[in-house]
Image (cartoon, coloured by chain):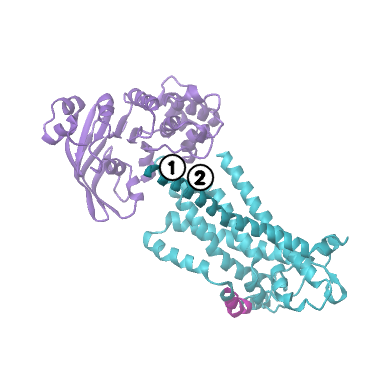
Amino acid sequence: MLGDSSLKYRVREDCITGWLLKVPVLIAVGMLVLFFVVLTAKSWPLLTGGNFWQVLTSSEWLPSEGKFGLWPFIIGTIAVTFLTMVLAVPVSVLAAVFLNEFAPKKLKAIALPVIDVLAAVPSVIYGACGVIAFIPMVKALGGALGINTTGRCLLTAALVLAIMVIPVILSIVRDVLAAIPQEAREALLALGATRWEATYHVVLKLALPGIIAAIMLGVSRAFGETMAVMMVAGSIPEPKPSLFKAVYTLPALIADKYGEMLSIKMYDVALMTAALILMVVIAFFNFGAHLILIRLRRKY
Amino acid sequence: MSHLSIKDLHVYYEGVETLKGIDLEIPDKSIVAIIGPSGCGKTTLLRSINRLLELSSDVKVTGSVEIDGENIYDPKADLISLRKKMGFLSQRPFPLPCSIFDNVAYGPKIHRMDADAINAVALSLEPASKVSKNRKEALANLVEICLVKAGLWDEVKERLGSPASRLSIGQQQRLSLARALAVGAEMILGDEPTSALDPISTKQIEEQFKALSSQYSIVMVTHILRQARRLADYVVFMYLGELIEHGPAEKIFNSPEKEMTRRYIKGDMS
């Protein structure tokens, strides 16, 4: 019967497409596993060499003497990321709230596409702007405060990164706010709440998991950013980060030194260890974000 | 007790006239049902009464909606206290993301009502209610009375602290009612308040409306004629943005003056 054979065909087709659709997911998951395996294998000599703790906590970076202290890079990356978030989170969340809850329609229509473009600007351009604008500004600021600085420092790197991640966080938070049902606002306004009360008590509360996810993504972006930071941060390992002192981050270290590592023993192992640390931290942040999201969802 | 009158109300959505000059006196202490086919402007009319309409973009309103003689479209009107006077139930109830107790207590809290103000609302709802000089106790009393009046107390009294989102949708709608009562609403607006509910929950809401109509004016939009028959004391029939006919329910349902009303009641158009 015709019906039978065509049904068989459709069932087989369904089965095959089901499998085909799984392939990209398996590739994506496989890549992550592969990264970890390769990086772990490459950094194995340092991980198991008995002085891994020292690699993490030592500030001595003298590759020619076989001393690979990663501490200044680790703390540098943390400091840059932390300062970036301190600068970027309030601005982006408040701007998103303003745009979604208070801004007139015309302003929204102009601002939202502009923000999306900003989020897509390549980081090298932010780096260039940092060199042109922020380095002299921070240098002048340091001068005004009586601090001697080249302008290539932690503060400049954080400013450039903040400008870079603001559109990313803003754009996601705006989407999250736009997804909150209009009934939520109406329920409060109808009780005689002001718009700010409706926003603060309900909209932001409901949006919180999404806002946290947006911030986590911003953290990942800032933590892993290489180009813009390399261009403005000064790239000198400092074990004690300070606003007006140069800073050297893990991604910048890997990008800077990868070419020159061939001749020195263990240099490649040290850089792969740096890469592994970067991966672990970013994975930790993402899983952490997921855990928070799951807990918040359960609560309400 | 507030009195509501609507005079020559026009509403334009993006330039299109959706309400074409509505004149209506809402009778006090009764259930008013606004009926009519989809897109006739029932919801627009309801939402123009508490100015929720203007949350949608590009809306223009002319004419007046007067509550106790005060035009809510007057630029100097105190929108917050006007909205407070009108409890609002939307199609889908929306529990605030907090406990059942806090949902009801939310209104008195944001309006910073003191113990006396809270007691006054409680007494207006239930003349025999307990009063307390202590604000916390007064608020607890009020929350109980509001939940009793909304017909929800017995179902939630053991778990006032649990999240309101765990309630069933029918319970959530009654919680919305309790929330509105707690700010001292003098009138209740319902935008198809039972359309998302199951038959039992619908019946519960209808029963609460019946019970409350001795104290409140209740204006509800409904597209269910049978519901209007069951509940309404007064019926407003609209068609394509115009008010076709209004009057006591008995008259509209049994001997309407206009042909269009008759056809709608008979079910020839919907």
Q: Residue at x 59, y 57 (%)?
A: A215
Q: Secondary structure at mark 1?
A: helix
Q: Is residue A129 magenta?
A: yes
Along the viewing direction, whichever of B171 and A199 lies nearer the viewer: B171
Instruction: Tell me the quarter of the picture where residue A252 sits.
Output: bottom right
Disc sitting over residue A201 in the figure: 2
Query: What's the magenta region?
Result: A126-136
Q: Earlier in the sequence, mark 2 or mark 1?
A: 1
What subunit carries mark 1?
Answer: A
Which residue does the image show at 57% across and 55% down from the upper left?
A23
Q: Which chain is represented by purple in the image?
A: B
Q: Who's the residue at 56% across and 31% down the image?
A: B161
A135 sits to left or right of B138: right
Secondary structure predominantly adopted by residues drawn in magenta? helix
In-front residue for pair A122/B5 = A122
2 and 1 marks in contact (CB < 8 Å): yes
Q: Residue at position x 71%, y 69% from top?
A: A249
User: Mark 2 falls on what kind of element?
Assistant: helix
Give the percent coordinates (x, y) of residue B247. Answer: 18, 30
Disc 2 from disc 1: Cα separation: 9 Å
Q: Quadrant of the N terminus of chain A?
A: top left
The residue at which mark 1 appears reads as A188
Figure quadrant of the C terminus of chain A: top right
Left or right, residue A141 beside residue A70: left
Above/below status of B83 relative to A57? above
